[in-house]
């Protein structure tokens, strides 16, 4: 993908986040657009989109805005070759804790999905018996 700055609508489409949500993340300092157009429109880079995708992945797992911000900062520290060792260690520890929490959340969600699939199968049986195939909803 080319490095041309993107307007908020394009970013919303790429990230599957609403424009309102992206603006909120800007307002709270999670992802500030890298540029503004002459007319004041928010302009985002590929790096901004990647940050928004990290947030999008964290949100359904129950991470707070502060935790999202700390994770984004930790990822930036690890990407910075000039970051001091203590900052790198602290960032690594926080990322590790987030990883463990995300794994736990995934396991919980898998269990919930299995229950939902079981219920769907249980509910499908009476429908199949009641309606001929051509009349099923």
Image (tube, rainbow, N blue to C red):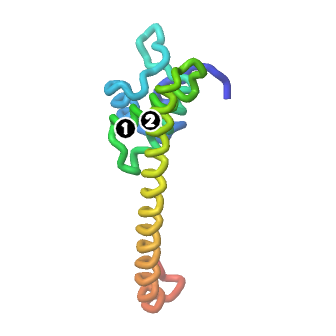
Residue at the top extreme?
38
- Looking at the figure, which quarter contains the N terminus? top right
Q: Position of residue 106 (x, y in %)?
A: 47, 58
Residue at the right extreme?
1
Circle 2: element type: helix
Q: Is residue 48 visible?
A: no
From what the image shows, is residue 98 above or below residue 115?
above
**Residue at the spot x=43%, y=90% of the render?**
130
Residue tagged by mark 2?
A: 71
From what the image shows, is residue 21 above or below residue 58?
above
**Residue at the spot x=43%, y=10% of the render?**
39
Give the class, few, some or many, for how many residues have Cα within 10 Å of label 2's Cα (few <14, many ≥20).
many
Q: Is residue 20 visible?
A: yes
Of residues 33 and 70, the one nearer the viewer is 70
Q: Position of residue 22 (x, y in %)?
A: 40, 31
Q: Are marks 2 and 1 in contact (CB under 8 Å)?
A: yes
- In this image, 20 relative to 55: left or right? left
Residue at the front extreme?
86
* Label disc, if present, on residue 85 of the rendered structure: none
Give the class, few, some or many, for how many residues have Cα within 10 Å of label 1's Cα (few <14, many ≥20).
some
**Residue at the spot x=43%, y=85% of the render?**
127
Residue tagged by mark 1?
A: 67
Of residues 33 and 108, the one nearer the viewer is 108
- Looking at the figure, which quarter contains the C terminus? bottom left
Residue at the bottom extreme?
129
**Residue at the spot x=50%, y=36% of the render?**
92
Q: Position of residue 108 (x, y in %)?
A: 42, 63
**How far separated are the C-alphas under marks 2 and 1?**
6 Å
Circle 1: element type: helix
From what the image shows, is residue 101 above or below residue 83?
below
Q: Please tell me how many numbered marks the rendered image carries.
A: 2
Of residues 65 and 33, the one nearer the viewer is 65
């Amino acid at each position: 993908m080319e490095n041309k700055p993107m307007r908020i609508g394009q970013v919303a489409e790429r990230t599957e986040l609403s424009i309102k949500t992206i603006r909120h993340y800007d307002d709270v300092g999670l992802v500030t657009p890298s540029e503004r157009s002459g007319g004041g429109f928010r302009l985002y880079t590929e790096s901004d989109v990647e940050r928004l995708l990290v947030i999008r992945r964290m949100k359904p797992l129950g991470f707070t805005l502060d935790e999202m911000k700390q994770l984004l900062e930790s990822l930036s520290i690890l990407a910075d070759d000039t970051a001091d060792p203590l900052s790198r260690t602290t960032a690594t520890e926080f990322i590790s804790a987030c990883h463990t929490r995300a794994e736990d959340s995934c396991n919980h969600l898998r269990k919930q999905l299995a229950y939902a699939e079981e219920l769907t199968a249980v509910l499908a049986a009476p429908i199949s018996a009641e309606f001929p195939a051509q009349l099923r909803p």
